[in-house]
Amino acid sequence: MPTLLLTPAERKEFQARAQSLKPVVLVGNAGLSPPVLQEIDRALASHELIKVRLAGADRKDREQAAEDIAEALSCAAVQIIGNMLVLFRPRPEEE
Protein backbone atom coordinates (compact mmCIF):
# COMPACT_ATOMS: atom_id res chain seq x y z
CA MET A 1 0.00 0.00 0.00
CA PRO A 2 1.27 3.51 -0.73
CA THR A 3 2.38 5.79 2.08
CA LEU A 4 0.39 8.97 2.56
CA LEU A 5 2.43 12.12 1.90
CA LEU A 6 1.80 15.36 3.77
CA THR A 7 2.69 18.93 2.87
CA PRO A 8 4.74 20.90 5.42
CA ALA A 9 1.63 22.97 6.31
CA GLU A 10 -0.45 19.82 6.93
CA ARG A 11 2.34 18.29 8.99
CA LYS A 12 2.55 21.42 11.15
CA GLU A 13 -1.23 21.46 11.68
CA PHE A 14 -1.29 17.78 12.71
CA GLN A 15 1.66 18.28 15.07
CA ALA A 16 -0.26 21.07 16.82
CA ARG A 17 -3.45 18.97 17.06
CA ALA A 18 -1.52 15.96 18.39
CA GLN A 19 -0.04 17.78 21.40
CA SER A 20 -3.13 17.21 23.52
CA LEU A 21 -3.55 13.54 22.53
CA LYS A 22 -2.69 10.58 24.72
CA PRO A 23 -1.20 7.40 23.21
CA VAL A 24 -3.86 4.90 22.19
CA VAL A 25 -1.60 1.98 21.20
CA LEU A 26 1.55 0.64 22.85
CA VAL A 27 4.09 -1.26 20.78
CA GLY A 28 5.97 -3.35 23.32
CA ASN A 29 9.26 -5.22 23.22
CA ALA A 30 7.75 -7.86 20.92
CA GLY A 31 7.57 -5.26 18.14
CA LEU A 32 5.05 -4.88 15.36
CA SER A 33 2.93 -8.00 15.34
CA PRO A 34 -0.21 -8.40 13.20
CA PRO A 35 -2.56 -7.80 16.19
CA VAL A 36 -0.74 -4.54 17.00
CA LEU A 37 -1.06 -3.40 13.37
CA GLN A 38 -4.78 -4.28 13.48
CA GLU A 39 -5.22 -2.21 16.64
CA ILE A 40 -3.42 0.76 15.05
CA ASP A 41 -5.62 0.36 11.97
CA ARG A 42 -8.78 0.39 14.12
CA ALA A 43 -7.60 3.46 16.02
CA LEU A 44 -6.83 5.32 12.77
CA ALA A 45 -10.23 4.38 11.35
CA SER A 46 -12.04 5.90 14.31
CA HIS A 47 -9.77 8.85 15.22
CA GLU A 48 -7.74 9.81 12.09
CA LEU A 49 -4.91 11.28 14.20
CA ILE A 50 -3.35 9.08 16.92
CA LYS A 51 -0.28 8.70 19.07
CA VAL A 52 1.54 5.38 19.39
CA ARG A 53 4.10 4.66 22.10
CA LEU A 54 7.09 2.66 20.87
CA ALA A 55 8.59 1.04 23.96
CA GLY A 56 12.08 -0.40 24.20
CA ALA A 57 13.43 0.75 20.85
CA ASP A 58 16.37 2.91 19.86
CA ARG A 59 16.05 5.78 17.38
CA LYS A 60 16.82 3.70 14.29
CA ASP A 61 14.27 1.03 15.29
CA ARG A 62 11.59 3.68 15.97
CA GLU A 63 12.15 5.25 12.54
CA GLN A 64 11.97 1.84 10.88
CA ALA A 65 8.78 0.99 12.80
CA ALA A 66 7.23 4.29 11.67
CA GLU A 67 8.07 3.50 8.03
CA ASP A 68 6.71 -0.05 8.37
CA ILE A 69 3.44 1.13 9.92
CA ALA A 70 2.98 3.90 7.35
CA GLU A 71 3.54 1.50 4.48
CA ALA A 72 1.40 -1.33 5.87
CA LEU A 73 -1.58 0.89 6.79
CA SER A 74 -1.37 3.62 4.10
CA CYS A 75 -1.02 6.37 6.66
CA ALA A 76 1.42 9.22 7.29
CA ALA A 77 3.96 9.33 10.09
CA VAL A 78 3.52 12.97 11.14
CA GLN A 79 6.37 13.04 13.65
CA ILE A 80 8.46 11.01 16.07
CA ILE A 81 9.33 12.62 19.39
CA GLY A 82 11.21 10.40 21.81
CA ASN A 83 9.28 7.16 21.93
CA MET A 84 6.02 8.72 20.65
CA LEU A 85 4.88 8.36 17.07
CA VAL A 86 2.07 10.50 15.64
CA LEU A 87 0.13 8.93 12.76
CA PHE A 88 -2.54 10.36 10.46
CA ARG A 89 -4.88 8.74 7.97
CA PRO A 90 -8.04 10.49 6.72
CA ARG A 91 -11.31 8.73 7.26
CA PRO A 92 -12.84 7.31 4.08
CA GLU A 93 -15.67 9.48 2.83
CA GLU A 94 -19.07 7.90 3.42
CA GLU A 95 -21.53 7.82 0.56
Image (cartoon, rainbow, N blue to C red):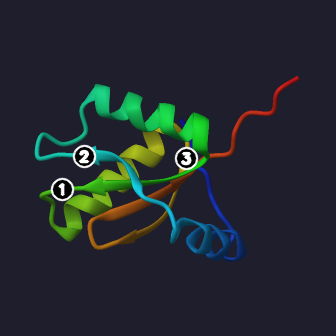
Residue 83, image quadrant: bottom left
Secondary structure of residue under mark 2: strand
Q: Amino acid at mark 1?
A: Ala
Q: Identify the residue shown where x is 71% and y is 76%.
A: 9
Q: Residues within 10 Å of mark 2 (few under 14, many from 20)?
A: some
Secondary structure of residue under mark 3: loop
State yes or no: discs 2 and 1 in contact (Cβ < 8 Å).
Answer: yes
State yes or no: discs 1 and 3 in contact (Cβ < 8 Å).
Answer: no
Residue 55 lies left or right of residue 80; in this view the side is: left
State yes or no: discs 3 and 2 in contact (Cβ < 8 Å).
Answer: no
Label 3 to label 2: alpha-carbon separation: 17 Å
Residue 64 lies left or right of residue 88; in this view the side is: left
**Which mark sits nearer the N-terminus, 3 or 2?**
2
Q: Amino acid at mark 3?
A: Cys
Residue 41 lies left or right of residue 16; in this view the side is: left
Q: Which residue matches tag 1?
A: 55
Residue 81 lies left or right of residue 18; in this view the side is: left
Q: Identify the residue shown where x is 46% and y is 43%.
A: 71
Secondary structure of residue under mark 1: loop
**Which mark sits nearer the N-terminus, 2 or 1?**
2
**Which mark sits nearer the N-terminus, 1 or 3?**
1
Position in image of residue 36 (x %, y %): 31, 34
Label 1 to label 3: alpha-carbon separation: 20 Å
Q: Identify the residue shown where x is 59% and y is 44%.
A: 47
Between 11 and 44, the one nearer to me in the picture: 44
Q: Residues within 10 Å of mark 3 (few under 14, many from 20)?
A: many
Position in image of residue 17 (x %, y %): 61, 68
Indicate which disc residue 27 carries.
Answer: 2
Q: Which residue matches tag 3?
A: 75
Q: Identify the residue shown where x is 46% and y is 48%.
A: 70
